[in-house]
Amino acid sequence: MNVTVFGTGYVGLVQGAILADVGHHVVCVDVDAEKVERLTQGHIPIYEPGLESLVRENFASGRLEFTTDSEAGVKHGQVQFIAVGTPPDEDGSADLKYVLAVAQTIAEHMDRKQIIINKSTVPVGTADKVRACITEKLADRGQGDLQFDVVSNPEFLKEGSAVADCQKPDRIIIGTENEATIEVMRELYAPFNRNHDKVIIMDVRSAELTKYAANCMLATKISFMNEIANLSERLGADIEMVRQGIGSDPRIGYHFIYPGVGYGGSCFPKDVQALIRASDNIDFDAKVLKAVEARNYEQKTTLFEKIARHYDNDLAGKTFALWGLSFKPSTDDMREAPSRVLMEALWQAGAKVQAYDPEAMEETQRLYGNRDDLTLCGTKESALKGADALVIVTEWQSFRAPDFAALSRELRQPVIFDGRNMFEPVRMIDKGFTYYSVGRQP
Ligand code: UGA
């Protein structure tokens, strides 16, 4: 099938590559000429395991193309994906300007029946807006009888495992009531719909809300666990035991109940906020979502509070080794990363940071530039040298089994503040460390 994808961000690029890989002929359109040029040379703008080889191979085979020529893009595809960003505007609502600009472009150039597929995370009612925008533009062009359908087909990929998530989706949500569209969508996704039927068909508004509900549910699980972890600390309980105790109930499950330093990234914070704003706009008070957001906001400061308490609020002149800058492992993404809240609080208190991350060093440099109170270290070991304590913010695999003897040697004092419960508190005490974790007893 000939497929066009507008937007070569996370969602668009991965989607385009996996569709090309199963044999569709995909043209990816982006307004950013430099990005398009780099993509045609095989340079991937994001760190995502498996993506670079997938893009290169399919580009070389001719099944995956990149262009800024939106007219050629529209003419190529039998289906048109909209996979552009929906950044929060000032009040946290999702800003639809990029989505509607693509809708305009499609309407300007389409010359046959089209299926427009919304992959971006968009508020309920967006498909109606896209439809209205296209109808109006077609009427202006005197092409009012050209047929089209707008489908909501949200994406559930996770950063760090985006390629695998797209290749083996848990579900394929198709929001449309048009039978002909359903047939085309089934054909498009047939290579990914193996073993059992993963396609769930529903009306367009339910599909739009499903995307937000999924992310908000996961964010709720995390905020809930962070709340119980804070309680655990104060009540003399161990959140790790509680986690296992409740996770064993299949109705609760083990996934996404790890307490930590709060959720970050480009999705949960933005989507929870956007659903709160959408609720406010229709005079509905989304009490649970507001609490989820508030808990997350506070959770991002808990590690700093533990550090400040340990040093009796005297952090001026102290140096902290910081392991993990990205918002989670296997990505270089630092959007809404808890590490940023922590570093900024430490700097504010007059402390210095020696930071290391396996992937996010360039991004940290881009965000913070050259500051006297930030040293970017080439290895996790070099970040320790002369630091007063180690702070762990992201649970990268390579942090799981450090050389503890070297750690005690390099740090001024054997003190670890662990925001991800990487180690067993009793073992750490045996090794001579003062060890702070989340929701556990020292
Ligand atoms: C999230 C969803 O998991 C995807 O299903 C969704 O498609 C995506 O948003 C999106 O809307 O595009 P992502 O933001 O890549 O994916 O990251 P997650 O792996 O979900 O992690 C989000 C945050 O939650 C991270 O900061 C992570 O550290 C935190 N987290 C996760 C916890 O604190 N505890 C947990 O138990 C799990």
Image (cartoon, helix red, strand yellow):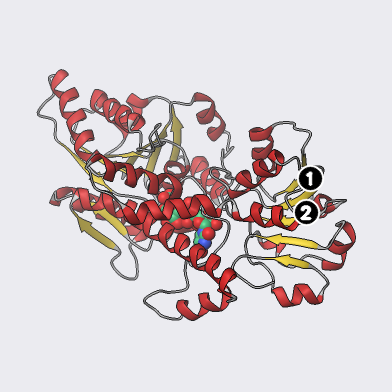
Image coordinates of residue 280 in percent, x first then y, are 28, 42
Whether tag 2 and tag 1 are in contact, CB under 8 A, the answer is yes
Image coordinates of residue 284 in percent, x first then y, are 24, 47
Work out whether residue 38 or residue 118 is closer to the camera in this orientation and state it.
118
Image coordinates of residue 360 in percent, x first then y, are 65, 45
Rendered residue at 85%/60% (across/down): 413
Residue that badge 2 annotates = 380
Badge 1 marks a residue whose secondary structure is loop
Above-or-below relation of 408 to 78? below
State left or right for residue 330 relative to residue 167.
Answer: right
Looking at the image, the residue that sits furthest to the right is: 409
* Quarter placement of the N terminus: top left
Work out whether residue 284 or residue 165 is closer to the camera in this orientation and state it.
284
Badge 2 marks a residue whose secondary structure is helix
Could you tell me the amino acid type at mark 1? Cys
Residue that badge 1 annotates = 377
Rendered residue at 51%/74% (across/down): 243
